Image: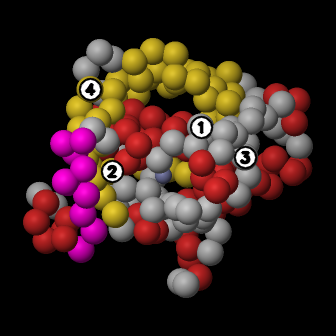
Amino acid sequence: MPKKQQHILQIGDPVLREKAVDVKPHLIQSARIQAFIAKMINTLHANEGVGLAAPQIGKLLRIIIVDNSGGKSRRKKNSEYFARHILINPRITQTSKKIEADWEGCLSIDNGDLLGMVPRYTQVTVTALDEKGKEITIQATEFQARVLQHEIDHLDGILFFDRMRKQDMKTLTTRYYWDKYYNK
Ligand code: ZN
């Protein structure tokens, strides 16, 4: 197994199907949680992802990281830029009526090499605590909204193909064929 993927659980690991628990707010600043957040950031960057949820590295805590600010991402379009946020106990408090399907992969499914069209809300509002325990609200659209919905799903044991409609299933493709036929 390639070294860089060593910390990311893969589909089939029962942990990925369990529900994570809230982090007690007074523990957010503890050395243990801060070290865990640092580990999540390192793991996300080492795998060139744009989002990671704590259960993916084996901890059933409600912590996610989203980050499309670096140059290493597989999704490089400027319009898809968003800053790094560490979100603890995140909750979707509002969604658009509009839903759109677009390509999605997951570091826990064949290390990100299986892609499919997944319907998601085009806009979401997410309220959470940040890494200092401060309440933050993010109003996200398009790609950021998609990544937030994907990562929050991980906290409830939901994987992206659970969200796919029957007619979306035939879009499932390896990254190799996605590059060959669909990457425009
Ligand atoms: Zn994922």
Q: Which residue is mark 2?
A: 104
The amino acid type, in three-letter code, at marker 1 is Asp
Q: Which residue is mark 1?
A: 156
Q: Which residue is mark 4?
A: 99
- In the picture, measured across the screen, residue 174 lies left or right of residue 50, that is left
Point out the tag, 1 or 4, that comes first from the N-terminus: 4
**Distance from Cα at disc 3 to Cα at disc 2:** 23 Å
Q: Which residue is mark 3?
A: 60
The amino acid type, in three-letter code, at marker 4 is Ile
Q: Which residues are magenta?
A: 166-176
Point out the tag, 3 or 4, that comes first from the N-terminus: 3
Do labels 3 and 2 touch, CB within 8 Å? no
Identify the image quadrant of the C terminus: bottom left
Q: Secondary structure at mark 1?
A: loop
Q: Secondary structure at mark 4?
A: strand
Q: Secondary structure at mark 2?
A: strand
Q: Secondary structure at mark 3?
A: loop
Mark 2 Cβ inside 8 Å of ligand 1: no
Work out whether residue 118 or residue 91 is closer to the camera in this orientation and state it: 118
The amino acid type, in three-letter code, at marker 2 is Glu
